[in-house]
Image (cartoon, helix red, strand yellow):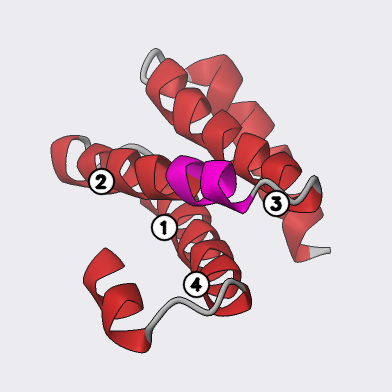
């Protein structure tokens, strides 16, 4: 239910704000990372998640008034997904901590 609410809110944002293209780019990277992960392409998933995290953090810093709750939700979701992939791939805990 929470994911559906976030998707509905995301759709409203994408229709109403010119900064939407920036957000949409990183949202799409998260989705591409999910697809890569499901296909077993963990390297691509990790790259997409890292890029999306960096972009979402930049968006937060440069445009703090751009739907902060939605950007924060997506950022935390992406960070969680990245950590899960890294754990699944057996990446050392000290390396994972450097990602954030």
Vertical arrangement, residue 82 with respect to residue 97, above or below: above
User: At 22% across and 35% down in the image, what residue appears?
Assistant: 63
- Residue annotated with mark 3: 37
* Labels 2 and 4 touching (C-beta < 8 A): no
Please identify the quadrant where the C terminus is shown. Answer: bottom left
Residue nearest the viewer, comparing 81 with 93 = 93
Residue 51 visible in the displayed image: yes
- Looking at the image, residue 30 sits to the left or right of residue 3; the answer is left
- Residue annotated with mark 4: 83
Q: Count residues near mark 3 (Cα–Cα under 10 Å), then give few for <14, some for 14-19, many for 20+.
A: some
Q: Count residues near mark 2 (Cα–Cα under 10 Å), then give few for <14, some for 14-19, many for 20+.
A: some
- Residue annotated with mark 2: 60
Q: Main secondary structure of the magenta part?
A: helix
Q: CA distance from mark 4 to mark 1?
A: 16 Å
Query: Residue 6 location in percent, x, y?
Result: 67, 50
Q: Count residues near mark 4 (Cα–Cα under 10 Å), then give few for <14, some for 14-19, many for 20+.
A: some
> Where, by quadrant of the figure, is residue 66 drawn?
top left
Q: CA distance from mark 4 to mark 3?
A: 12 Å
Residue nearest the viewer, comparing 10 with 48 = 48
Q: Earlier in the sequence, mark 1 or mark 2?
A: 2
- Residue annotated with mark 1: 72
- Report if residue 64 lies within the magenta region: no
Q: CA distance from mark 2 to mark 4?
A: 21 Å
Residue 100 visible in the displayed image: no
Which marked residue is nearer to the observer: mark 3 or mark 2?
Answer: 3
Q: CA distance from mark 3 to mark 1?
A: 22 Å
Q: Earlier in the sequence, mark 4 or mark 1?
A: 1
* Labels 3 and 2 touching (C-beta < 8 A): no
- In terms of secondary structure, where does tag 4 sit? helix
Please identify the quadrant where the N terminus is shown. Answer: bottom right
Vertical arrangement, residue 58 with respect to residue 97, above or below: above
């Amino acid at each position: 239910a929470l994911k559906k609410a976030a998707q509905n809110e995301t759709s409203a944002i994408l229709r109403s704000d010119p900064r939407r293209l920036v957000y949409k780019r990183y949202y799409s990277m998260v989705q591409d990372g999910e697809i890569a992960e499901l296909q077993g392409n963990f390297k691509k998933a990790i790259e997409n998640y890292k890029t999306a995290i960096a972009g979402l953090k930049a968006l937060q810093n440069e445009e703090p008034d751009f739907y902060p709750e939605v950007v924060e939700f997506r950022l935390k979701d992406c960070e969680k997904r990245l950590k899960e992939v890294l754990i699944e791939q057996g990446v050392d805990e000290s390396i994972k901590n450097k990602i954030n």
